[in-house]
Image: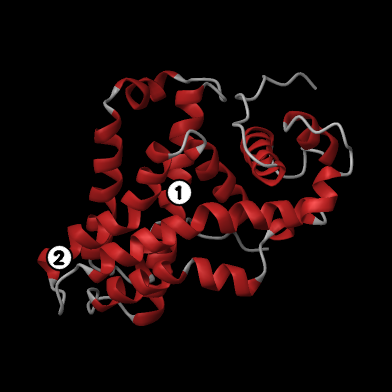
């Protein structure tokens, strides 16, 4: 398989170099496609057992990357949530939406590998084989659960189960939108005609649109199950 060269790995200790190399390769080629040998090579490790020595396995490396990167995102979101007015009301929904999105965006701007992490996180979230341990996940996504509870409190017009589902859909959408946007910008996927506006619009407008979509989702009325079945064609009799 022909692979584009990865960005130069920053100087640092061996564990940092391995995490940087793994993050880059995973984000470009997927969690399953990248081998331990390729990560060692990209990190400049001649010792073929270097990754196993430091992380135990490829899954161990995935978890270490998640912990190292997400700790800052989680802390930043807690900081933003703590600064919100108490109690919240409808006029504070934009601030809550910013807390959902901006910690990811700030991470992308702060670190040279920030865009790689967003794609990496989207893959980890979607691939049950590479899920991090429950304990690690709960610790480092505590701000997301806090944000979800605050958002649901602002949706009294939506039944609880539907509100939980809506918040989950919004959370998943945020990092998948960001990940796919940066795949386009980075040239990792073929551009289609309808994606031209995504690439030519200012980056701030993309972030603003994500925030606006979250605001709209929180405020949107609940249509009920009828809307999902109203337009379904009749099932032919067997």
Q: Residue at x 62, y 75 (%)?
A: 135
The answer to whether 176 appears left or right of 198 in the picture is: right
Q: Position of residue 93 (x, y in %)?
A: 19, 63
What residue did someone put label 1 on? Answer: 175
> Left or right of 43: which side holds 12?
left
Q: Is residue 59 left or right of residue 215?
A: right
**Does residue 2 appear to the left or right of 233 in the view shown?**
right
Q: Nearer the viewer, residue 122 or 75?
A: 75
- Residue that mark 2 sits on: 92
Identify whether 189 is placed above or below 26. above
Residue pictured at 32% horizontal, 80% vertical: 159
Q: Indicate whether 87 appears above or below 222.
A: below
At 76% from the left edge and 36% from the top edge, which residue is drawn? 39
Quadrant housing residue 94? bottom left
Q: How is the image coloured?
A: secondary structure
- Within-10-Å neighbours for mark 1: few <14, some 14–19, many 20+: many
Residue 146 x/y as whole percent: 37, 74
């Amino acid at each position: 398989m022909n692979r584009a060269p990865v960005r130069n790995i920053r100087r640092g200790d061996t564990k940092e170099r391995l995490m940087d190399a793994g993050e880059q390769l995973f984000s470009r080629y997927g969690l399953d496609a990248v081998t331990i040998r390729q990560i060692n090579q990209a990190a400049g490790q001649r010792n073929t057992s270097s990754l196993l020595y430091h992380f135990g396995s490829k899954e161990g490396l995935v978890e270490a990357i998640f912990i190292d990167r997400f700790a800052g995102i989680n802390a930043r979101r807690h900081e933003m949530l703590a600064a919100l007015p108490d109690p919240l009301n409808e006029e504070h929904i934009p601030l809550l939406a910013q807390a959902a999105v901006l910690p990811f965006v700030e991470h992308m701007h702060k670190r040279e590998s920030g865009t790689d992490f967003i794609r990496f996180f989207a893959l980890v979230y979607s691939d049950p084989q590479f899920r991090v341990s429950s304990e690690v996940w709960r610790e480092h996504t505590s701000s997301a659960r806090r944000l979800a509870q605050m958002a649901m409190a602002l949706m009294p017009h939506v039944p609880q189960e539907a509100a939980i589902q809506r918040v989950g859909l919004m959370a998943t959408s945020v990092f998948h939108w960001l990940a796919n946007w940066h795949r386009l910008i980075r040239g990792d996927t073929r551009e289609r005609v309808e994606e031209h506006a995504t690439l030519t619009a200012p980056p701030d407008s993309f972030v603003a649109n994500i925030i606006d979509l979250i605001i709209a989702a929180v405020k949107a009325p609940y249509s009920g199950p009828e809307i999902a079945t109203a337009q379904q064609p009749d099932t032919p009799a067997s």
